[in-house]
Image: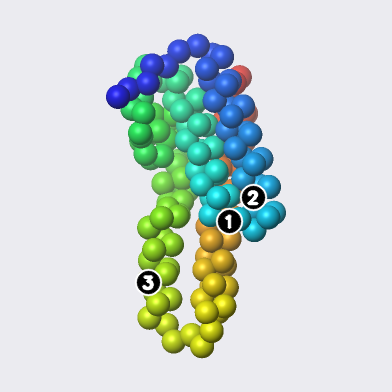
Amino acid sequence: MRMRLGRKSDKRSLMKRAVRDFELARRYGEAKEYVTESVLYQKAAEKILRALSMRHAKKLPKDASLGYLAKKARIPESIYGDLVEMPDERSEMIEEEERLSFMDMEKEEDQNRVLESTERSHAMTKRNVVKRLMDYAMASTNL
């Protein structure tokens, strides 16, 4: 199913919601809820890219990848490369859990510490990329 794109107010609404998701993600990070923080950064990136894409595309698929949206939005290559390489929480956390299950750790808290460190690292990476994307969107458009 494709979403119809329309007025400038739709773009502004998406950007406002993206900023709200970004700020909410930061609060979850402060509370050490890193997976939720990462998911919210991902959602913010999707909303920003959809808003930027409205300048160039008449229709966008409802479930589009960040890479697809980034191409439609025609963002700079430096941001595009970082966006498409952002960690995917589901697959990366499954891989990390599988790797840890084979490690000989004496305590479960050691495994939890390693997982939390990985989650925090993913969240920080996403925050930095989405912040750059947001700055680009605000500077390059009148959204």
Q: CA distance from mark 2 to mark 3?
A: 26 Å
Q: Residue at x 68, y 55 (%)?
A: 31
Say whether residue 108 is visible: yes
Q: Residue at x 40, y 77 (%)?
A: 101
Count residues near mark 3 (Cα–Cα under 10 Å), then give few for <14, some for 14-19, many for 20+: few
Q: Element type at marker 1?
A: helix
Coordinates of residue 67 in the picture (x, y in percent):
38, 40
The reply to whether the C-beta atoms of the residues labelled 2 and 3 are less than 8 Å apart is no
Q: CA distance from mark 1 to mark 3?
A: 19 Å
Residue occupied by mark 1: 34
| 28, above or below 139, in the image | below
Quadrant housing the N terminus: top left
Coordinates of residue 140 in the picture (x, y in percent):
58, 26
Tell me which label, 2 or 1, sits earlier in the chain: 2
The amino acid beneath tag 2 is Tyr
Coordinates of residue 25 in the picture (x, y in percent):
62, 45
Residue farthest top in this picture: 7
Q: Quadrant of residue 15?
A: top right
Quadrant housing the C terminus: top right
Q: Quadrant of residue 60?
A: top left
Residue occupied by mark 2: 28
The reply to whether the C-beta atoms of the residues labelled 2 and 1 are less than 8 Å apart is yes
Q: Which mark is residue 98?
A: 3
| Residue in the foreground of this view, choosing between 125 and 61 | 61
Say whether residue 140 is visible: no
Count residues near mark 2 (Cα–Cα under 10 Å), then give few for <14, some for 14-19, many for 20+: some
| Residue in the foreground of this view, choosing between 81 and 16 | 16
| 32, above or below 76, in the image | below
